[in-house]
């Protein structure tokens, strides 16, 4: 429900009221969605977001139950509280969706992302990159005489911070998985117990 | 007992097991094996349409008038893409449909084969669920699931895409009662604690309104009965959306008429001024609410809906009740009676006096004429001359649709078929055929505008072939009337492309199809002409030439609140304000 750039009051000459009626605070929420791992299901879930104008900041999907053919989709989205509720309701009524959990609303959760960074450089820059990688607990998973690939797991903020540091030291490429998240403690997920 | 058979036979077997009697469809290369199976049996009737859009609207008419799912069979590629409008229409209006499409063989998918289209991709956003079946062993189970999903919870269209090699291959048939239970089991009983809060609202309400919608009709005839019981017992006023007409009888004492953009003055002002709003199976559509910020500002609201995403989507409510209307109303009545069947009688009496004042405005008054037929008059006469008959009405989309909703009275559910959510011109003619196929003895009338009617007029061929004696009552204003009205009111009377030129001679057109054509332009001859239409044993195209510049009132301009309603310019309304704009 992104507010449209239309002058206030312009609606009186339009067929539709184009102003956003509830421009409230925007929140970021992480949702975990358990779905049947069947063809088209991911497209259906993503189509809901694009079709209804919701945001996707991060998205990860993988089958988590091979026997039951269930996948877990973790999606980070943004919106007013009403929009977030609406996204949850829209997801939960979808036929192939088994469960929807708003991890942000349901209590504390752990969120992690994996990233790979390719850093090219020689001399001091190279040494500095390696030193920072150690501080950040990034692993070297590939190295040549002129480059490293670092692997790091952490919160998105930590990955951003590391990327910022690597940029002047020769960062040439970055690959990120998007967020995987779980509620802290014993969650009410049946597949966790 | 599982039995081996081809995929094509499985399709027909699964439809029989689901109790399907009629399939609306159109053949093509990718569904020939299924057509071959249809040819070799007599239990399922196939209605050959003239365009796949027609098939889907017919199935909608069939479904809406029977409460059973409508079934469609079309070929791949263009057959499937032609079905898209109907699917979207059914999704918006919660009509249960099972649409079967042929597809190129599995080994050709993705090669841009002849008549290949990504049908599940194209129809994903316009179906409740869809499936591409790549393995014959899964076909019968998928079709049974499809029926389950179409009917359960909030009904809607589903689609099963069946590649041609899957139709030819053989596998074991899974009977209906042997399918894996799907997890899709939407909640149907309302939360008793929330219902208790609703009951308290009922007990104390001073200015209540029951705001009912298509969900009452989708919930089944019992829901309409319970609504009538609740209304009679509480004495509350009832209004309804376009989709809910007939759930409460138009002749009922508590009926305040349809609400919304072209709803009645009393209904909209009651919505605006109420202190308790009980939404039963409606969804706060923008044609209903007008400007959200000013929508019924002083009321506490309860909302009964089977779809969790409908609740709090546009209007925040105080008492959300997720559940099926029938079950929720049963529980509401039970709790309310158990607590002594209380209402606020003094408040109610005052409220009804207020509603009486609004009614006295007589918002549907129009200036009649003895020279030209006014569309409202045509509908009044149609109503008078068909009253009490076993009657079903469909409509196209436009002014005529709104007038039909205003001037025809519906006494029972499932008697009124109209495209509400999508507003699809071209819906009414095929829908009327679908209704007639389901109710061969009934009187089925499509109240049409000439422009909409032309959009699917090829289906007159279907009506002729299948002896569906549908009456096409065309209110011909030679205008895209609703568009013209908006241009008059909002675009400085610049009538950009909103007139119907080069119209066919509808009487000759009727003759060309082999049915009866009637033309009438004189109000004095109207009754006789309508009787001639009703007495004719077969399809009729009735060209009713009406006033060309009539506007449909009342009207709440888009984005305005309920109390900024425009009334007509009829004499009786002079008291309201010279410009017809009312601010209450
Ligand atoms: C398929 C489609 N295209 C366009 C519209 C926009 N539209 C709404 S009403 C209308 C005019 C309908 O004219 P007619 O059927 O003659 O009915 P009238 O309003 O004159 O009664 C149009 C073009 C629509 N609803 N559906
Ligand atoms: Mg017209």
Image (cartoon, rainbow, N blue to C red):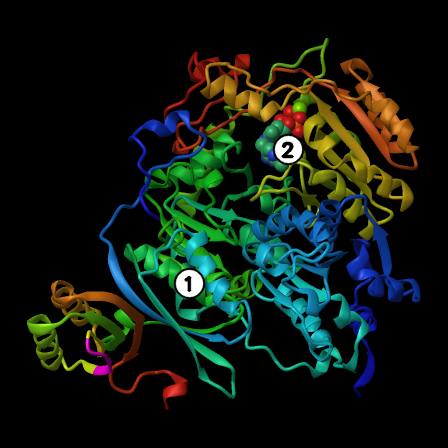
Question: For the view shown, which residue lies furthest in the bottom direction?
Answer: A193
Task: Judge whether A151 appears above or below B580 on screen.
Answer: below
Q: Residue at x 83, y 45 (%)?
A: B442
- The disc at residue B401 is 2
Residue B224 on the magenta segment: no
**Chain for disc number 2:** B
Q: How many marks?
A: 2
User: Dot 1, how many residues are within 10 Å of its Cα: few (below 14), some (14-19), or many (20+)?
Assistant: some
**The residue tagged with tag 2: helix, strand or loop?**
helix
The answer to which quarter of the image holds residue A56 is bottom left
Please identify the quadrant where the N terminus of chain B is shown: bottom right
Q: Is residue B340 visible?
A: no
Magenta part of the protein: which range?
A140-145
> Residue A89 has which mark?
1
The one of B562 and B470 positioned closer to us in this rendering: B470
> How far apart are the alpha carbons under marks 1 and 2?
33 Å
Quadrant of the snapshot with the C terminus of chain B: top left
Q: Residues within 10 Å of mark 2 (few under 14, many from 20)?
A: many
Q: Residue at x 30, y 79 (%)?
A: A182
Whole-percent x and y of residue B458? Answer: 80, 37
- Quadrant containing ligand 1 reads top right
In the rendered structure, the residue with mark 1 lies on which chain?
A: A
Percent from the top left, x then y, of residue B117? 65, 55
Observer able to see residue A43: yes
Which residue sits at x=44%, y=31%?
B558
Q: Is mark 2 within 8 Å of ligand 1?
A: yes
Q: Looking at the picture, how far across and down is residue B255, in whole percent?
A: 57, 41
- Residue drawn at 72 percent across, 48 percent down: B61
Residue B256 spot, x, y in % from top left: 54, 38
């Amino acid at each position: 429900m992104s507010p449209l750039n239309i002058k206030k009051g312009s609606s009186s000459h339009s067929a539709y009221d184009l102003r956003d009626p509830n421009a409230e605070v925007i929140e970021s929420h992480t949702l975990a969605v358990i779905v049947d791992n069947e063809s088209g299901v991911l497209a259906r879930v993503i189509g809901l977001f694009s079709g209804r104008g919701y945001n996707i900041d991060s998205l990860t999907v993988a089958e988590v139950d091979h026997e039951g053919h269930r996948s877990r989709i973790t999606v980070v989205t943004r919106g007013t509280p009403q929009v977030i509720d609406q996204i949850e309701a829209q997801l939960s009524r979808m036929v192939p969706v088994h469960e929807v959990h708003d991890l942000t609303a349901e209590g504390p959760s752990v969120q992690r992302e994996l990233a790979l960074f390719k850093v090219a450089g020689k001399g001091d820059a190279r040494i500095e990159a390696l030193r920072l990688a150690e501080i950040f607990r990034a692993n070297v998973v590939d190295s040549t005489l002129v480059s490293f690939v670092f692997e790091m797991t952490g919160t998105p903020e930590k990955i951003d911070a590391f990327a910022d540091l690597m940029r002047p030291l020769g960062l040439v490429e970055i690959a990120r998985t998007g967020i995987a998240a779980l509620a802290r403690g014993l969650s009410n997920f049946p597949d966790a117990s | 007992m599982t039995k081996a058979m081809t995929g094509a036979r499985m399709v027909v077997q699964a439809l029989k097991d689901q109790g399907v009697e009629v399939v609306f469809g159109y053949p093509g290369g990718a569904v020939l094996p299924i057509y071959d199976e249809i040819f070799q049996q007599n239990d399922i009737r196939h209605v050959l349409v003239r365009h796949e859009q027609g098939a889907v609207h017919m199935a909608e008419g069939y479904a809406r008038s029977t409460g059973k799912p409508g079934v469609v069979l079309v070929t791949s590629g263009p057959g499937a893409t032609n079905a898209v409008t109907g699917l979207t229409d059914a999704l918006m209006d919660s009509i249960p449909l099972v649409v079967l499409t042929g597809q190129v063989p599995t080994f050709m998918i993705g090669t841009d084969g002849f008549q290949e289209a990504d049908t599940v991709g194209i129809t994903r956003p316009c179906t409740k669920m869809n499936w591409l079946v790549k393995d014959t062993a899964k076909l019968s189970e998928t079709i049974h699931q499809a029926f389950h999903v179409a009917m359960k919870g909030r009904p809607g269209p589903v689609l099963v895409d069946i590649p041609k090699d899957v139709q030819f291959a053989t596998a074991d048939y899974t009977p209906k009662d042997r399918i894996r239970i799907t997890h899709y089991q939407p909640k149907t009983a309302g939360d008793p604690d929330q219902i208790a809060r609703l009951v308290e609202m009922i007990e104390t309400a001073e200015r209540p309104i029951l705001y009912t919608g298509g969900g009452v009709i989708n919930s089944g005839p019992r829901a309409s009965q319970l609504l009538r019981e609740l209304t009679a017992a509480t004495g509350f006023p009832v209004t309804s959306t376009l989709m809910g007409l007939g759930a409460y009888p138009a002749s009922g004492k508590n009926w305040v008429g349809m609400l919304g953009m072209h709803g009645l003055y009393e209904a909209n002002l009651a919505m605006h001024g109420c202190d308790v709003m009980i939404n039963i199976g409606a969804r706060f559509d923008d044609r209903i609410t007008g400007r959200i910020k000013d929508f019924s500002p002083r009321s506490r609201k309860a909302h009964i809906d089977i779809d969790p995403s409908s609740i709090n989507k546009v209007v925040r409510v105080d008492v959300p009740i997720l559940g099926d209307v029938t079950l929720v109303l049963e529980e509401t009545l039970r709790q309310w009676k158990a607590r002594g069947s209380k209402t606020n009688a003094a408040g109610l009496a005052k409220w009804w006096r207020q509603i009486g004042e609004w009614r006295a405005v007589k918002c549907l008054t129009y200036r009649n004429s003895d020279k030209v037929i006014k569309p409202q008059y045509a509908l009044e006469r149609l109503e008078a001359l068909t009253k009490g008959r076993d009657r079903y009405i469909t409509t196209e989309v436009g002014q005529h649709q709104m007038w039909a909703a205003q001037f025809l009275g519906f006494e029972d559910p499932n008697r009124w078929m109209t495209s509400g959510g999508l507003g699809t011109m071209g819906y009414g003619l095929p829908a009327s055929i679908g209704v007639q196929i389901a109710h061969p003895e009934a009187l089925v009338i499509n109240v049409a505008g000439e422009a909409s009617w032309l959009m699917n007029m090829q289906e007159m061929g279907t009506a002729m072939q299948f002896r569906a004696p549908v009456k096409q009552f065309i209110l011909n204003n030679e205008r895209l009337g609703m568009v013209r009205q908006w241009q008059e009111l909002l675009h400085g009377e610049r009538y950009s492309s909103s007139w119907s030129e080069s119209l066919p001679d509808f009487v000759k057109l009727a003759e060309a199809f082999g049915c009866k054509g009637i033309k009438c332009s004189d109000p004095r001859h109207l009754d006789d002409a309508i009787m001639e239409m009703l007495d004719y044993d077969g399809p009729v195209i009735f060209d009713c030439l009406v006033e060309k510049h009539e506007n449909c009132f009342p009207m709440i301009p888009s984005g305005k609140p309920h109390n900024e309603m425009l009334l007509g310019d009829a004499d009786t309304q002079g008291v309201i304000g010279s410009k017809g704009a009312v601010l209450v």
